[in-house]
Image (tube, rainbow, N blue to C red):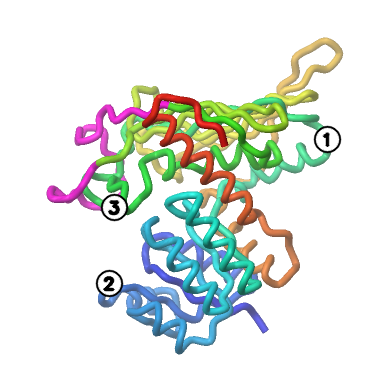
């Protein structure tokens, strides 16, 4: 019997979740969305049998084994806990929640229900990330001493006054929205225990329409815009490793850049995605490189992988189904999500207090 999945949220990410679950051998049988007609439209588009305008109704009436959550950040934790308590496995979009304390509550619910809890950290599933992790696991890199995580945009604010820019709904700006490279760097580093965080945030350009990106939701003149535009920080770990981070929606840089660079005892490496002026995935360039010393010479190796316009989203969703069925190891764990959210909490606390935060 295939894993039967219900999806909460009929937005754009559904296309990737649906494709991934099917690729992994699962079956999407239900979709729920509070917006009138949204679930019905998605049901028709993707051939999903059941459509609901209530999560409670879907959980009560649909014979599903797992739930995928694709909604604004504020609702991640409460919906995940509700579904776990109903005995369903949960695959939740990023960020895991608004805070580390919410992730802790999600973990308690997962362990109590004995159900799997995973998150869509899809950049781990990109082909170049998988190849880099293979090199790290094989010992080619040695021990990673330090890393630099970067997701920066020059004009990428996702609108004004919507849920993205309302801290009570989103949890924050680019730090929590573009957390992928922080997660990927820590993934390469073995997800060490963080000890100290020092960070600064900037709200420069927030409210300036010239720095809006080509995505997001319509502006709401009566809405709230109270999140950062950029952040810079430094994290130390219990084992001596160190991580610097730079994330932004709006910052005076040349072009959008998405990258993790690391320095190992045997080799360094870089996974990067460079965007063109249109900022679209279809025009982005992905690279994977290793840096070594051989016979006294500096050698840079380019690792060639297949193209992946969806940035690993489909493979990430497929892995959720495969992990439930026990045929693949999960690409992420709740404890890793908790460490990540503790760092994000500390970034905001450090920026507010002007002090380093000890975890």
Residue located 62% across and 64% down the image: 320
**Residue 280: x %, y % from top left:** 40, 43
The tag earlier along the polypeptide, 3 or 1, is 1
Q: What residue is drawn where x is 20% and y is 33%? A: 208
User: Of helix, strand and loop, which one carries label 1?
Assistant: loop
Query: Marks 2 and 3: which is nearer the front?
Result: 3
Q: Which residue is mark 1?
A: 139
Instruction: Please name the residue shown 68% across and 28% down the image.
Output: 241
Query: What is the magenta range?
Result: 200-225
Front-most of 52 and 318?
52
Q: Quadrant of the N terminus?
A: bottom right
C-alpha separation, residue under disc 2 versus residue under disc 3: 15 Å
Q: Is 221 one of the magenta-colored residues? A: yes
Residue 129, numbered label: none
Q: Is residue 110 above or below residue 342?
A: below
For mark 3, give the secondary structure.
Answer: helix
Q: Which residue is mark 3?
A: 163
Instruction: For the C terminus, give its image quadrant.
Output: top right
- How many C-alpha atoms fall within 10 Å of the one at disc 2: few (<14), some, or many (≥20)? few
Tag 2 residue:
35
Question: Percent position (x, y) of residue 154?
Answer: 35, 29
Total numbered badges shown on the rendered structure: 3
Please tell me how crowded label 1 is: few (under 14), some (14-19), or many (20+) other residues with Cα within 10 Å.
few
Tell me the element at label 2: loop
């Amino acid at each position: 019997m295939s894993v039967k999945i219900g999806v909460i949220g009929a937005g754009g990410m559904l296309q990737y979740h649906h494709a991934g679950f099917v690729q992994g051998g699962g079956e999407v049988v239900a979709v729920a969305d509070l917006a009138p007609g949204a679930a019905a439209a998605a049901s028709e588009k993707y051939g999903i049998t059941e459509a609901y305008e209530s999560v409670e109704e879907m959980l009560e009436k649909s014979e599903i084994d797992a739930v995928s959550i694709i909604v604004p950040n504020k609702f991640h934790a409460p919906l995940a806990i509700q579904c776990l308590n109903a005995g369903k496995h949960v695959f939740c979009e990023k960020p895991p929640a608004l805070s580390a304390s919410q992730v802790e509550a999600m973990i308690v619910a997962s362990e109590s229900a004995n159900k799997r809890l995973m998150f869509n950290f899809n950049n781990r599933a990109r082909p170049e990330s998988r190849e880099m992790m293979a090199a790290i696991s094989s010992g080619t890199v040695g021990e990673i001493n330090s890393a630099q995580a970067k997701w920066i945009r020059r004009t990428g604010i996702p609108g004004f006054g919507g849920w993205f820019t309302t801290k009570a709904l989103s949890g924050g700006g680019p730090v929590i929205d573009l957390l992928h490279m922080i997660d990927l760097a820590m993934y390469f580093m073995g997800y060490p225990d963080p000890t100290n965080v020092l960070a600064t945030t900037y709200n420069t350009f927030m409210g300036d329409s010239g720095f809006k990106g080509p995505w997001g939701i319509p502006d709401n003149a009566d809405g709230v815009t109270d999140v950062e535009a950029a952040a810079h920080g430094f994290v130390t770990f219990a084992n001596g490793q160190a991580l610097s981070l730079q994330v932004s929606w709006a910052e005076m840089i040349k072009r959008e850049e998405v990258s993790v660079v690391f320095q190992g005892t045997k080799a360094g490496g870089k996974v990067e995605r460079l965007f063109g002026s249109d900022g679209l995935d279809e025009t982005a360039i992905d690279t994977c490189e290793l840096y070594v010393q051989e016979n006294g010479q500096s050698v840079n190796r380019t690792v060639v992988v297949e193209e992946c316009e969806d940035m690993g989203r489909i493979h990430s969703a497929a892995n959720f189904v495969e992990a439930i069925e026990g045929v693949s190891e999960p690409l992420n764990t709740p404890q890793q999500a908790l460490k990540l959210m503790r760092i994000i909490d500390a970034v905001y606390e450090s920026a507010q207090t002007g002090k380093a935060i000890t975890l």
